[in-house]
Amino acid sequence: MRNIILVIFLVLPFSLAFADSHPTRAYFGDTHLHTSYSPDAGMAGTKVGPNDAYRFVLGETVTSSTGQAATISKPLDFVVIADHAENLGLADAIATSDPGLLADPFGKELYDLVMAGKGVDAFNALVQKMNKGAEAKIKSEAMLRNAWTKIMELADRYNDPGEFTAFIGYEWTSQPGGNNLHRVVVFRGDKASVDPVLPFSNFDSENVEDLWDYMAAYEKESGGQVLAIPHNGNLSSGMMFSPEYQTDGKPIDKAYADNRSRWEPIVEVTQAKGTGEAHPFLSPDDKFADFEIVDTTNLGGTAERTTDMIQYEYVRPALKMGLEFDESLGANPFKFGLIGSTDSHAGLPATREDNWWGKAPFLEPSPDRWKDVLIRSSRDPSLDLTALQLAASGLAGVWATDNTREAIWDAMARKEVFGTTGTRLQVRAFGGYDFGPGDLKELDLASKGYTAGVPMGGDLAAAPEGASPSFLVEAMRDPNGANLDRIQIVKGWLDQDGVSQEAVYDVVWSDPDTRVLDAQGNLPSVGSSVDEIEATYSNTIGADSLRGFWEDPAFDPAQKAFYYVRVMEIPTPRWLAYDRKNYDLYDEMPKDVRYSSQERAYGSPIWYSPR
């Protein structure tokens, strides 16, 4: 008995130490949620304020802006209420007839429109004015300070360490000429540490370099920590991942590259207004690159899309371009992890296709929402952003040691994150030089992954002589969702001429006995169990979990590279199929839209450098 006790005593501290130092579970949340405090949302009719938004994400039933009872399918683990800094609290100021608001000509114009029952017109007027920067500013500092104080107080009130995390944050909404350069700014600390500063807005500067200066000054003066999350770049007219400075158009240099990777460790790869992983024009050999593409115009509906813009709007080409900058500058401006979030402007961040509460209040469930337009172009109706283009996406997955502000923020800072298109499928990947197929038998794959390699967001050291990077990958389906089709690894690298290349590899998939790679390396489709008319599917195909080992077959130790995981679910109905079924719209809704798709998750890259 004494020996048994001794064994337990020796083993237990090790396992506890491992659990303390490495994440043991994934937390799901939304880093991009708007409420009635966002001026555009408030003008468009959003009545759900920050307090009710917190109640909703925690699983309570709230009254939506259209008077419906709304409940999330499963509570979130964390949230960033990221209301726009520009004219923050405008709707509340209108409701209370704020004197500063009424003294401002533009504020009075918006007030009169809302009072006349023309909230959507007020919303469109605000969006168009925002394209002109500081012209949209309403000169009432009391309006901003009052709203910001309430936001910080509510975040502290709802933050429950170990159970639920409420971050203090906001959105910096730069969109010069209607081009989306938005960032969500996320503080690590509480109200006491954030209180000395007001949100830095587009009215202060539309240049991201100035936002980084604000963040640096905040950290220096307060001792706190802060990071920024760029939005999906598909509505930026080629500006989100531009190789040039925003301020003067000069080629970015090492200082810019260092600052961008320092302040923006993660990027939003998917949300309601489109998924920005890859584009079929740039990745014609990737048969899954056409997922939820929204690319006819920019955010303001003011510019037509040209093909030369696309390479600077999607994360895969940006990651590839980052390798080229690393080679020439010794620094990588686009070394970021990947997450998803909703960008909901209804205060209701639901992402299940059968329980989607829409992008805005006028897109909440109704028989007519499929006809609606989210953003009307002032130039050309063909540039409108319509409801039919929207997706019920996405979620941020974070591998953290605990559900606290500190642990989740730190995980985002080190890029140990992944993004999903709305489901809660989990993905994990580790890279190293000492993995083998036998490791897949391990009960806890992460133990091997951390001890012999690096997780998502990590860096592989120079390869030992004769070695190639190998990867352990693992995915588990959403317990209330669809089975898995496959796990892929996307590789980007610099060839011998210093030009970036890409390849997509199928690593592990369901039904391996009947689905085999052909001579060209292509994997047969998993098939589909979807009945689009009835908006149903079944898990009679696919797998509930997948594990795989993969070694790079074309590795060159002299070439910089990155590797990230993409996990595919089996096909399932989209929100449009559920609406068509629920409201009996078979004869009304268009036939030429997609009523099913394959939801997916994107893991953060692992980078390899010869250095």
Image (cartoon, grey):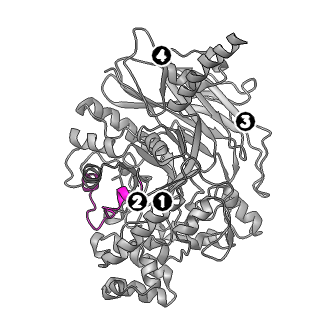
The answer to the question of whether label 1 and label 2 lie on touching residues, with beta carbons closer than 8 A, is: yes
The kind of residue tagged 4 is Tyr
Q: Residues within 10 Å of mark 3 (few under 14, many from 20)?
A: some
Q: Is residue 50 left or right of residue 440?
A: left
**From this viewpoint, which residue is outermost toward the front?**
2
Mark 4 lies on residue? 433
Q: Residues within 10 Å of mark 4 (few under 14, many from 20)?
A: some
The kind of residue tagged 2 is Lys
Tag shown at residue 519: none
The residue lying toward the viewer, choosing from 223 and 273, is 223
Q: In the rendered structure, which segment of residues is drawn in magenta?
A: 190-213
Q: CA distance from mark 4 to mark 2?
A: 44 Å
Mark 2 lies on residue? 191
Tag shown at residue 156: 1
Q: Residue at x 51, y 47 (%)?
A: 404
Q: Residues within 10 Å of mark 2 (few under 14, many from 20)?
A: some
Mark 3 lies on residue? 544
Q: CA distance from mark 1 to mark 2?
A: 7 Å
The answer to the question of whether label 1 and label 3 lie on touching residues, with beta carbons closer than 8 A, is: no
- In percent of width and height, residue 45 lies at 53, 77
